[in-house]
Amino acid sequence: MCGHNRFPLAARNISALAKACLTVQKNARARTPAENELTIKGKAYIAGIYEHPTRHAPDKSTAQLHAEVAKGAIEDAGLTKDDIDGYFCAGDAPGGLWPMVDYLGLNTKKLRHVDSTETGGCSYLIHLGHAAEAIAAGKCSIALVTLAGKPRTGAMPPRAAGAELDFESAYGATTHNAYGMCAMRHMHDYGTTSEQLAWIKVAASHHAQYNPHAMLKEVVTVEDVLNSPMIADPLHRMDCCVVTDGGGAMIVTTEEIARSLKKPLVRLIGHGEAMKGPRGGKDLDLTYSAGVWSGPRAFEEAGVTPKDIKYASIYDSFTITVLMQLEDLGFCKKGEGGKFVADGNLISGFGKLPFNTDGGGLCSNHPVNRGGMTKILEAVRQLRGEAHPKVQVPNCDLAIAHGTGGLLGVRHAASTCILERV
Amino acid sequence: MAEVKYNAPVTNPESAPFWEAARRGKFLIKRCTACGEPHYFPRSICPFCFSDKTEWEEASGEATVYTYSIMRKSPTGPYAIAYVTLKEGPSLQTNIVDCDLDKIRIGQKVKVVWKPTDGAPLPFFTAV
């Protein structure tokens, strides 16, 4: 506006305009950059986290698991249930918002913001972004996000179909073969190999050996992965994540409240979300995910680049999921993910990009077939310095948590969160 | 998957012409006369330019395999899920059937075949 010179102005008016501009600039200097920007950068803190230690819970109800993880996260933050004024849950919460708010006994005189965004496994990464938006807008100050369920005890109900129902449901798309189709085309286009994919599982297993709660604690080799049974070509059993009962929860709050609590300060400085699907079948390309859009949005907001990241939580429903997302987020060029993940590059203390230091979904936990929450939780542990000493990244002050939900080879969402230790 | 019994399509007013044509062995796609783009599965409003000037068009049924995966763990035996790209342009999800699944390759030519249900038949693709 200050540079506007489309119309000639009298000297007196120019002077008045310049004065007005100076006033604006003076006011701008009085405010912090974050206050002047339409951004969630630095406005929300993760003050409480909890991951249920169970991996098999036939003796518990799903609602009960939600309550147990909520209790764990609230206590980790040093708060009480009645402090909660925002609640977020996704499709795994029995009955959705109304029954969960009632079952948990949240204080309905205080609860003033709810969100049940459902984007599969990345729902909780999107919830974190949405909680930050609500906190930045003053719509709530202490938000609880819960995830829990029991797919290991019994099959999960099928997803509701969309308009594609009659045109796709007969073909038997499952998580395995939908991701298998991505891997097959990635191999075709870029020469990616099963050995390279196997390195992702190998790295996860090196981390899982130190996690007492991990479902699979045994360190495996590339040969072990290649020798495991083929499930959906070209994905072997060890290319697939575990199926676990359990869950996790987090508390998202304001800077002021976070500073009044006792935990190390971890805040969200960038968030992105995106969706991708076949969209009428034009220019189909299964070698990239919606992370190509959510990633840059988050990095731009945070003002950092992939090179700055010290620790990465990357959604690992399958090994190919990790490889494609690392490319899409810009940790390497498209097509070079195979070389990037090989030879232990993802192993903490050894490689350049320590990832999923809890063992991830490939070895530790993939509760409710949804890995988004546990991605956030391990990133927060790393930023707090609370990861296992054998896998803790030294001076870890910047981390990424990224996930996808739905089927990478069909329709999916992606969400990227950049987290910083203050 | 010869023994698999497929559910009949539910159909709705928007998709009914596709399934009526399927009963006559014709494989239809939609084309937008405003932007010229074909698409699949069929919508009344073009997913590219959002025009309502979409028309049914009979496709050749010829396609090439874009990608595939053989599902090895299935109670009804192995099956091949795939995306094939129609000669007319759009890619779609399907199964490759009635051929040696281990010989399926990306780029391979395939053609539409129909499998019966209690209602309209469903389109699948097989090696040429």
Image (cartoon, helix red, strand yellow):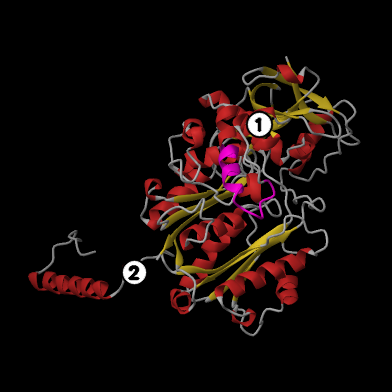
* Badge 1 amino acid: Asp
Residue A414, percent from left and from top: 56, 49
Answer with the quarter of the image where residue A124 lies: bottom right
Callout 1: SS: helix
Q: Which residues are magenta?
A: A200-216
Residue ID at (71%, 22%): B61
Residue ID at (34%, 69%): A36
Q: Is residue A146 above or below residue A343?
A: below
Residue ID at (77%, 36%): A172
Q: Chain of mark 1?
A: A
Mark pair 2, 1: CA separation: 54 Å
Is residue A264 rendered to the left or right of residue A182?
left
* Badge 2 amino acid: Asn
Q: Say which quadrant the N terminus of chain A sits in.
A: bottom left
- Is the residue marked by circle 2 packed among few (<14), some (14-19), or many (20+) residues within 10 Å? few
Q: Is residue A242 above or below residue A126?
A: above
Callout 2: SS: helix
Q: Earlier in the sequence, mark 2 or mark 1?
A: 2
Query: Which residue is under mark 1?
Result: A224
- Is residue A212 within the magenta segment? yes
The answer to whether any part of residue A244 appears in the image is yes
- Is residue A181 within the magenta segment? no
Residue ID at (53%, 57%): A387
